[in-house]
Image (tube, rainbow, N blue to C red):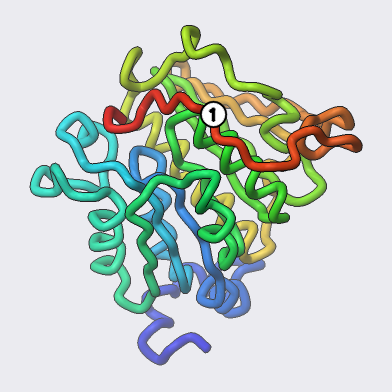
Amino acid sequence: MISASSPDRYSRHLLLRGFGDEGQERLLNSKVLIAGAGGLGSPCALYLAAAGVGTIGVADGDLVSLSNLQRQIIHATEDVGRNKAASAAEKMQRANADIQLRTYEQFLTEDNILDVIAPYDFVLDCTDSYASKYLINDACVMAGKAFCCGGVVEYAGQLMTHVPGAACYRCLFPEPPAERHLQTCSTVGVLGPAVGIMGSMQAAEALKFLTGIGDLLTNQLLVFDSLDMTFQKFAVARDASCSLCGSDPTVTQLREYSFQPCRGRS
């Protein structure tokens, strides 16, 4: 039940058509994992904490660096050198002392990811490497977990949500690009507010999933360009020949791609 001190905190949720007390109760009883406490994870962490999601996990093995602060707004100058998950959790607890926080001060790997995601209702992929994105996609599909994947490079970003039975990341992109063709924030740059916009949209997808309101970005790819402020949505069908979620899958065990282009430089 919403505590006696909570109605004022969540009053604007309680007023929302289709949300109300029931939606807020669902949030308070929900568990979300944020994978990556960087540019995308910063707004996700702050908005989910403020919204009253009952249990939030934050997983990140990276340390805060000075180059992160241009966009990773949950961290401050005094956090440089700290683990990102620990730094983010401190700010989240400060924002809402009623929520429960779990930190995983490590990178997700093929050896630990299934155990880490197991308790959670929804996973937010806020990572910035292809290796991590394919690992999270594969693990969530295998475990039957809903998740939202976001990514931003330079001025543009992409977003999609998966629930069991819908198209997965491999339906769109069966394999990552060759390492020599990779573009990352550490090689071509990234606009800070563009990351904030996409991360906020990931938080909205999580809240919609948990409360059952609205329509999720399933079987769709949302593309955002901050240079001309355009949003485009492309329909994506589940691929019957997908190597992971198709009728005859060949990806049946977790396998982490070897390259991690952004670790330590994100």
Give neighbour class at mark 1: few <14, some 14-19, many 20+ (Cα, 10 Å). Answer: some
- Residue 18 found in image quarter: bottom right
Q: Is residue 157 above or below residue 198?
A: above
The residue tagged 1 is: 257
Residue drawn at (74%, 35%), measured in percent from left and top? 251
Count the labels in the image. Answer: 1
Nearest the viewer among 183 and 156 is 183
Q: Quadrant of the C terminus?
A: top left
Can residue 207 be seen by looking at this rendering?
Answer: no
Nearest the viewer among 50 and 168 is 168
| x, y percent for residue 86 | 26, 57
Mark 1 residue type: Tyr
- Residue 128 found in image quarter: top left
Decide if residue 17 is on the left or right side of residue 110.
right
Residue drawn at (28%, 66%), measured in percent from left and top? 95
Can residue 235 be seen by looking at this rendering?
Answer: yes
Residue drawn at (24%, 67%), measured in percent from left and top? 94
Decide if residue 76 is on the left or right side of residue 232.
left
Nearest the viewer among 68 and 209 is 68
Residue drawn at (43%, 73%), measured in percent from left and top? 10
Farthest residue, direction bottom: 4
Give the secondary structure at mark 1. Answer: loop
Farthest residue, direction left: 78
| x, y percent for residue 255 | 60, 36
| x, y percent for residue 235 | 77, 29
Decide if residue 262 is on the left or right side of residue 91.
right
Nearest the viewer among 123 and 227 is 123
Q: Is residue 81 above or below residue 5?
A: above
Q: Is residue 181 above or below residue 203?
A: above
| x, y percent for residue 244 | 76, 36
